[in-house]
Image (cartoon, coloured by chain):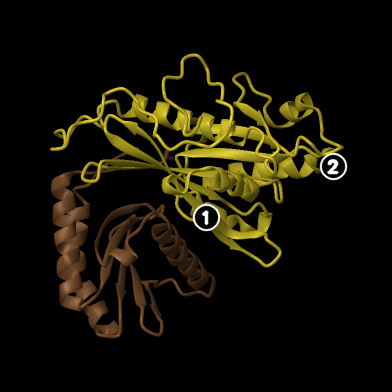
């Protein structure tokens, strides 16, 4: 995360990791297609001719104003294949929030588990404290004929006293894609405020009239998408609504 | 074991860093210089507007640097001091500037890579000193 008091910008890095061909790039493509061009940068994809991500996909998204600071989220995907551990660890540098995208197909449950194990190893290698990292699970491809029941995926990937937030998605059609992104961004912002409550008030106000102290969503919004539902305690606006 | 490192840049530090980057661009006759966090996030830049980072440049530059370094290590070359690219007219140099920061400098054929490298070497200590003043927390 980077706080620039000079340009009054806060930038967070969010990474989509997960099972190979589970739809990580599709998530970014959908987000790219639905966000106003003025609020996002180019979708940069380093992929093979077979559209497999070999290094990362990348896209910056401008979001809300917090105490007069523009918030930017840079979204990355990492390659899912086990052999790309080195590049995954590089892309995980400085990550502020993580989505694990699992494939709902019953035939790929074992691969989901293997990918989750690999990700934990990558996080360890990148010297990140997983228990402090905002993290959400995404069960993608809920529309495939052999989709495993949600309870089955939960049992495999989310069996813990305080389960991670889970989103059942169909990234090709955008179902719950923004709900997942918004939830992660909320967690990241909550962590930021909890860890550095005075970070945005340490510098004098700018010469121009300051923005209202409460959180302001940007005017340019997603053209159509139902508002995501957040926990009642959430006080931050969504990236898009 | 850490969570991600948070980094803060104040207006005064931004001015100081930009002044050093401006000096570097002038001395080396470069067209653009930027400091990047190793995560790919831009800290500060100076120079031609067409090179300005909206996010993509930093991500690609950082990714390029670390991928090349990893490749060098796999080829048993552990002294990786930077990466330079020479195009038809636009060239760039990527070099570490401190523990977790990269210097990205773009130049054209008005100057020479050797001159740019020499100017970078000259200014690096000042950049590193200034970068040490950035607010950091885990």
Q: Which mark is residue B35?
A: none
- Is B57 located above or below residue A10 in the figure? below
Residue at left 18%, top 57%? B17
Q: Would you say the residues marked 1 and 2 are in contact, meaning their CB atoms lie under 8 Å apart? A: no
Q: Position of residue A161 (x, y in %)?
A: 62, 18
Which quarter of the rendering shows the N terminus of chain A?
top left
Q: Is residue B70 above or below residue A68?
A: below
Q: What element carries label 2?
A: helix
Q: In the depicted view, which residue is nearer to us: B95 or B75?
A: B95
Q: Which chain carries label 2?
A: A
In the image, which lettered chain appears brown? B
Q: Which numbered circle lies on residue A107?
A: 2
Task: Find chain A in the image and tell me its colour.
Answer: yellow
Q: In this view, does B106 lie to the left or right of A168?
A: left
Q: Where does label 1 land, which residue?
A: A43
Same chain assignment for discs 1 and 2: yes
* Number of other residues with Cα within 10 Å of mark 1, as a class: few under 14, some 14 to 19, many 20 or more: some
């Amino acid at each position: 995360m980077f706080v620039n008091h000079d340009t009054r910008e806060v930038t967070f890095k969010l990474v989509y990791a997960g099972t190979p061909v589970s739809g990580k790039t599709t998530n970014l493509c959908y987000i790219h297609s639905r966000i106003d061009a003025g609020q996002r940068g180019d979708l940069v994809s380093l992929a093979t001719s077979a559209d497999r991500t070999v290094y990362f996909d990348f896209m910056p998204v401008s979001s809300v104003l917090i105490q007069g600071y523009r918030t930017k989220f840079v979204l990355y995907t990492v390659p899912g294949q086990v052999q790309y551990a080195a590049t995954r660890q590089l892309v995980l540098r400085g990550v502020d929030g993580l989505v694990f995208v699992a494939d709902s197909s019953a035939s790929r449950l074992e691969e989901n588990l293997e990918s989750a194990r690999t990700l934990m190893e990558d996080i360890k290698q990148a010297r990140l404290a997983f228990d402090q990292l905002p993290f959400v699970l995404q069960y993608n491809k809920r529309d495939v004929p052999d989709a495993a029941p949600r309870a089955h995926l939960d049992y495999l990937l989310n069996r813990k006293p305080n389960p991670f937030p889970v989103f059942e998605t169909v990234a090709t059609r955008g179902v719950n894609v923004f709900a997942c992104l918004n939830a992660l961004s909320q967690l990241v912002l909550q962590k930021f405020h909890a860890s550095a409550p005075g970070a945005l008030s340490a510098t004098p106000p700018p010469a121009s009239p300051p923005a209202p102290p409460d959180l302001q969503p940007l005017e340019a919004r997603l053209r159509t998408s139902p508002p995501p539902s957040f926990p009642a305690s959430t006080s931050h606006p969504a990236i898009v609504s | 074991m850490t969570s991600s490192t948070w980094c803060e840049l104040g207006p005064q530090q931004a001015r100081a860093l930009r002044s050093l980057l401006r000096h570097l661009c002038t001395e080396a006759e470069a067209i653009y210089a930027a400091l990047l966090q190793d995560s790919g996030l831009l800290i500060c830049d100076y120079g031609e507007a067409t090179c300005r980072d909206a996010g993509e440049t930093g991500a690609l530059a950082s990714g390029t640097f670390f991928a090349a370094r990893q490749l060098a290590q796999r080829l048993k070359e552990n002294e990786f001091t930077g990466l330079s690219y020479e195009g038809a007219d636009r060239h760039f140099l990527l070099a570490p500037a401190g523990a977790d920061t990269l210097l990205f400098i773009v130049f054209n054929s008005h100057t020479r890579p050797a001159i740019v490298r020499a100017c970078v070497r000259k200014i690096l200590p000042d950049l590193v000193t200034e970068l040490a003043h950035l607010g950091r927390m885990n």
